[in-house]
Image (cartoon, coloured by chain):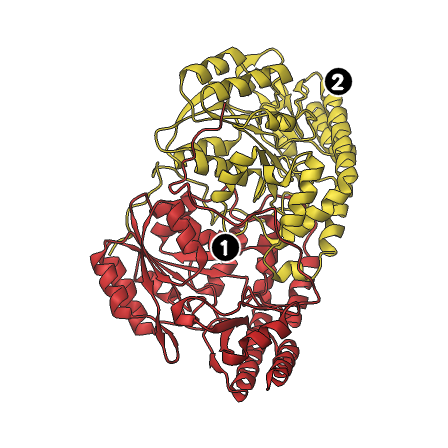
Chain colours: A yellow, B red
Amino acid sequence: MPAPRTAVADPTLTRPDWTRGSPRDPARLWLDKNENWDPELNRVVAEVMRALPAEAYCTYPESAQLYAKLAAWAGVEPGNLMLAAGSDGVIRSVFEAYVEPGDTVIHTVPTFAMYSVYSRMYGARVVGIEYERGSDGPVLAIDRLLTAIRTEGPKLVCLPNPDSPTGTVVPPEQLESIIAAAGEAGALMLVDEAYHPFHPDSVVPAIARYPHLVVCRSTGKAWGMAGIRIGYGVASPEVAKILHKVRPMYEVGAVAVHAFEAMLDHADAMRASVARLEAGKALFLAEMETLGFKVLKGAGNFCHVAFGAHAAAIHARLDGRVMYRKDFAEPCLAGYSRFSAATPELFAPVIALIRAAIQGNRP
Amino acid sequence: MPAPRTAVADPTLTRPDWTRGSPRDPARLWLDKNENWDPELNRVVAEVMRALPAEAYCTYPESAQLYAKLAAWAGVEPGNLMLAAGSDGVIRSVFEAYVEPGDTVIHTVPTFAMYSVYSRMYGARVVGIEYERGSDGPVLAIDRLLTAIRTEGPKLVCLPNPDSPTGTVVPPEQLESIIAAAGEAGALMLVDEAYHPFHPDSVVPAIARYPHLVVCRSTGKAWGMAGIRIGYGVASPEVAKILHKVRPMYEVGAVAVHAFEAMLDHADAMRASVARLEAGKALFLAEMETLGFKVLKGAGNFCHVAFGAHAAAIHARLDGRVMYRKDFAEPCLAGYSRFSAATPELFAPVIALIRAAIQGNRP
């Protein structure tokens, strides 16, 4: 009696082994996942979490109040919103509600890993638009993207803005032309604003004009709430209603609902944290440029440094102390290493280690 | 530029309006959703939540340690497990990984609402096995279920044990014959043990013998962690691997991972809470029988009372004070009202209100 055949569109899809991995070593600096480790914001989140009403732990959620509060904060109506387990939950719902086997999905390459995973999970044909390598970092050929939208018959076009790991943004006018082209092609357009408001521009106000537009946002970056796992999508009421059709029993739990509701009263703390992380990033990049390294500032809560001939020495010195994404293999970022944004205080020892590595590396 | 057509198999599927609802009024007793409001267990969960390490709030999860600890607790291997956002998350993954449009799903009627929702979402034909009305409550005709499994060509057979809202259980030998029949029919068999260990029997040990068996469990009932939204599935390594293929970016967040890991050290507090709720249920039902009402003890953390001619007076008296599920319409439970299990202390005012209603109702 074997188990039946799976219905997963691409059964060769593999995912990371869930039985491996170890807890975070608090002695290390974790700058590899674009989390927000700002101690001041973390203190605010901790206070909110420790002040949760006791019933938050033992009850199923009542979310309408959060929907109303979040709608006011985002400048939309509750009927435009969908809460989910992270912005990833919104992305997945978009695939689930709109993508059938054989449909075409257009997304950038490289980008957030789940666009490729969900495309395979739901049996989509992917048209990947690869970033080109420019002298100042990855470049998206907007004309190629527009041509693909017009000629490939996509069901879904996905564009994180800023994109990750490239850190690139599409300027507002061009972004609007991409959204419009997707609509004309009969596609749903997903703009992933996970890094909002590190990059303050948003297409949320365009929701009113484009019924085929979905925007997703995370609380894992600016809000410092990655562990609470709550994100949201914004869409026309028509699309929001369809995304809600595929929601689980509850989109998110009562703890997440209470926590996000309380955190919306601390949007100033979130913005102050964004400012601290921007300051830390600016300091780090200025130091790296002083050391002669090419850097990419990027528009998300992360940045890139090309360590060049010092790469091996620096990686060795940071090993076991600082976690970061080493030397991308993708042509558009080849030779660059990525660091999540941190406060100036958190970056100070990283800078010191890099300086020490260079000195030790001199002939 | 309208939005494209949805890929949802049954686009007529509707879900509750997310913009409506209000926060729980703490002055009421919430006995309508089978949550665990035991104050003593709630205090343990609150302590665990308030002692979470600060990085639980701002990080993406590392779950391998919880998988190992949970596996030891459940008597299986980490490779048998899948964490999810509640047992509902496991159920959904089973549908997603195995059910294609046109497939047949067999489930009991009435049962947990999401079996019907997911069947429509994934385009399944449902063969519903209706509970019959017996003198001692709903009765599942096992022979009809077995015949359906053998003749309807199911891809998936779903059976909560205990079932909800009926509170019924299938005895171990018959349950094994159902599991075996599903396997012989080439179906996946999902046994939903959301109410474990209110009902202490489990088919988890049978996983080793039945590669087509999946068991899901909740932490929302016995563990008092409904708000934290973490459940798990147990299956053969082969099926677990397939369920993991359709998992989101992260199955659950770091807060939930840390909380459940810590709570596993308090399994004694969970068991003590189950005992308190069983005592409360026994007290409540004994009082109801004293008052002359027919009761159904059931095997989950809930029970049923048929208020008969006093129903209207009792509902009026409890209105706005006690939330519960009034007068089922389904034939097998017609006339019964359902109350979640609570401690003797929490049930005392409910009993007093019911007594008062009856006295007020006397001619």
Checking the image for residue A290, the label placed there is 2
Same chain for mark 2 and mark 1? The answer is no
The C terminus of chain A appears in which quarter of the rendering?
top right
The answer for how far apart the CA atoms under marks 2 and 1 are is 46 Å
Checking the image for residue A87, the label placed there is none
Q: Give the residue displayed 62% in from the left and 15% down from the top.
A: A173
Residue B339: horizontal and vertical position, in percent?
Answer: 54, 72
Specify the amino acid type for callout 1.
Answer: Tyr
Residue A341: horizontal and vertical position, in percent?
Answer: 69, 31
- Residue B185 is left or right of residue A99, and the answer is left
Kindly tell me whether residue A132 is visible in this rendering. Answer: yes
Compare residues B138 and A346 and report the one nearer the observer: B138
Compare residues A119 and B245 and report the one nearer the observer: A119
Q: Give the residue displayed 59% in from the left and 22% down from the top.
A: A336
Q: Secondary structure at mark 1?
A: helix
Labels 2, 1: front one: 1
**Corner quadrant of residue B324:** bottom right
Specify the amino acid type for callout 2.
Answer: Thr
- Residue A251 is left or right of residue B82, and the answer is right
- Residue B30 is left or right of residue B140, and the answer is right
Compare residues B204 and A314 and report the one nearer the observer: B204
Residue B135: horizontal and vertical position, in percent?
Answer: 37, 80
Q: Which residue is mark 1?
A: B67
Residue B161: horizontal and vertical position, in percent?
Answer: 40, 67
Q: Secondary structure at mark 2?
A: helix
The 10 Å Cα crowd at callout 1, few under 14, some 14 to 19, many 20 or more, is: many
Subunit of label 2: A
Subunit of label 1: B
The 10 Å Cα crowd at callout 2, few under 14, some 14 to 19, many 20 or more, is: few
